[in-house]
Image: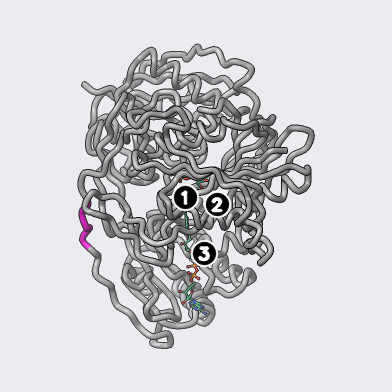
Amino acid sequence: MQVVVLVKSIPDPSGEAKLGPDFLVIREGDGVLDPGDEYAVEAALTLAEASGGEVAVVSMGPANAASAIRRALAMGAHRATHISDEALRGADALATAKVLAAAVRRSPFDLVLAGVESTDGYTGTLPMTVAEMLGVPSATFARKVEVTAGVARVERQTEAGYDVVECALPALVTVTASAAEPRFPTLKGIMSARSKPLEQLALADLGLSPAEVAPTQRVVAVEATAEKGPGEVIQAGDDDAARIADLLAEAKVI
Amino acid sequence: MAKVWVFTEVSADGTPAPSALELLTKARSLGDAEAVALGPGATASAAALGAHGASTVHASDDPVFTDHLSQPAAHALHALVERHRPNLILFASTHDSRDVAGRLQARTGSALMSNATDVVSPDLARTAIAGGSQLVDVALEGPVPRLILVRPKSFAAEPSGGTAAMVPVDVEIPEELRRARRLERHEETASGPKLEEARVVVAGGRGLQDAQNFALLHELAAALGNAAVGASRAVVDAGWIAYSHQVGQTGKTVKPEVYLAFGISGALQHVVGMKGAKRIVAINKDPDAPIFRLADLGVVGDALQVLPALIAEVKARRV
Ligand SMILES: Cc1cc2nc3c(=O)[nH]c(=O)nc-3n(C[C@H](O)[C@H](O)[C@H](O)COP(=O)(O)OP(=O)(O)OC[C@H]3O[C@@H](n4cnc5c(N)ncnc54)[C@H](O)[C@@H]3O)c2cc1C
Ligand SMILES: Nc1ncnc2c1ncn2[C@@H]1O[C@H](COP(=O)(O)O)[C@@H](O)[C@H]1O
């Protein structure tokens, strides 16, 4: 089974996100593999191992996305495609979906996995846009994915519980944190990642023009909201239960 | 006048999702509001949708829309878009609607904005970032309809007293769009009020130390009577409590009278789901926990000691 994982490189989440004067996120330093996408990589590796297949990762991002891609390779992915182009700076979800769909289409695939939403952008719609462009069925919010005889069986988290969904391959599935426990790259994995195929592509290699990836949405203003000042803080033991109960009574809920 | 559509989820008994009524209330202030409802119960929902401002309801009761994920709905919605050319479609940020919006975008090439908290005009929407400390205005350009996913409870639903014309949706769904099938539905039946509707939410995070300690939260909720149990993602991921209790970015949005956070740090992604609460009480042993910045009352200390004392106090006051 050929599994493709869409992985995003994000600015180190332990740092503070900053916006530049053009309202775009400043992406300095090495990117990290989005923790949400690590679950997708893990799920892909598990499925490919069971079927004797391979895992390819596809990522669109600036040059510093390379470290995130290498992490996916170090975890065990077999090869990677990195799409990077000056014309993609500030690309929105639609443009990103066009690029990723075009990159995925270049090789045969059985299953595309992605995260439910990215840690920095959290639009959460991009994988579905890719699925529609690829013309494949999909299941989102998978907390469990199994594949038997060309059919993916997914436990899909819902607002009230979960659904069981079946989907003929080829298909696209987005996975939650419950779907897999990401493995830690071994030293051997890190070493071998260096010699795995990493294909670098520009927009033109995908047959796309800059006009086709022009953003359709633009941040035009950013404004700080009035911060509600902190309220009263007491130490536990200072009648805490009575004070909380007073507040509940004031709110007329007891 | 702008034609503003609301993509509406309905339950089989004809009850529209509360978020649809919120969105219709907003839609009618932006232009001529219409609703699209697909799946069993759609036709029966027309009265309620009309009463909240939909002049027309495009409805189909065909179970294909609930038996198969996203593709049939996106296909039918796209056909309706081609026929009626709305300027804007509002969706609630639910799992199903999000999927339909993402697919529709591939077909129409329109701007799709996620996580909106306000819609200023058919081509300008707002979102809150950094846990609500900054508001961002986003201009939507390119082909219509513009597509916006709105966070639940961004608007209050208000009846308009109107009635809607019902237009049946007659779009053929090709066999190849029926490949993802929903085989089973499992719903947890929780006792007490629903999390989104409860007047009090008692929520727990990693600071509760152990899955077993959530029993204390359930006990407090039961003592209060009108309360539901919420949770941070950290404890949901750890398997301490089901996902349906998660509050935040990827979970539910709640606006109770009182939100009590026990051992929750107050990460941005949690805060977006609960900062609309009227009153916030935080119990955390770390005096620098970010949650204290939005708490009306903060208690610095061990949640596991405060909880039993509070349960006893509430029980004493309620007799
Ligand atoms: C894309 C994305 C989406 C996300 N969506 C959500 C979401 O929907 N909801 C959500 O909640 N999170 C979400 N998160 C995760 C979020 O960033 C935090 O990791 C999470 O909210 C932390 O949960 P917590 O507060 O329980 O745990 P922690 O951050 O570990 O905090 C535990 C707190 O408990 C306190 N504590 C410890 N012991 C005690 C004690 N005995 N008594 C009192 N206090 C104690 C500690 O001081 C600490 O402040 C999301 C993250 C990402 C990247
Ligand atoms: N630039 C990108 N390159 C590769 N995959 C991406 C990119 N952006 C988003 N994705 C995938 O889409 C998922 C959802 O992202 P988002 O729509 O940004 O919330 C992520 O978890 C990734 O799997």
Is the CB of the residue bearing disc 1 within 8 angstroms of ligand 2? yes
Distance of label 1 from label 2 (alpha carbons): 8 Å
Same chain under badges 1 and 3? The reply is no
The image position of residue B103, as x and y in percent, is 48, 29
Which residue does the numbered mark 3 point to in the structure image?
B221
Is the CB of the residue bearing disc 3 within 8 angstroms of ligand 1? no
Q: Do the CB atoms of the residues marked 1 and 3 lie less than 8 Å apart?
A: no
The image position of residue B243, as x and y in percent, is 57, 54
Does residue B125 sit above or below B286 in this rendering? above
Quarter where residue B45 is shown: top left
Is the CB of the residue bearing disc 2 within 8 angstroms of ligand 2? yes
Which residue does the numbered mark 1 point to in the structure image?
A118
Quarter where residue B124 is shown: top left
Is disc 3 placed on a helix, strand or loop? helix
Is disc 1 placed on a helix, strand or loop? loop
Q: Do the CB atoms of the residues marked 1 and 2 lie less than 8 Å apart?
A: yes
Which residue does the numbered mark 2 point to in the structure image?
A37
- Quarter of the picture containing the N terminus of chain B is top left
**Image: magenta residue range:** A222-226
Distance of label 2 from label 3 (alpha carbons): 36 Å
User: Mark 3: which amino acid?
Assistant: Ala
- Between A110 and A254, the one lying in front of the other is A110
> Given this view, does label 2 or label 3 mark the residue nearer the observer?
2
Is residue B136 in sight in this rendering?
yes
Q: Is residue A9 left or right of residue B4?
A: right
Same chain under badges 2 and 3? The reply is no
Which of the two labelled residues, at mark 1 and mark 2, occupies the earlier sequence position?
2
- Between B281 and A212, the one lying in front of the other is A212
Tell me the chain of label 3: B
Q: Is residue A89 left or right of residue B167?
A: left
User: Mark 2: which amino acid?
Assistant: Asp
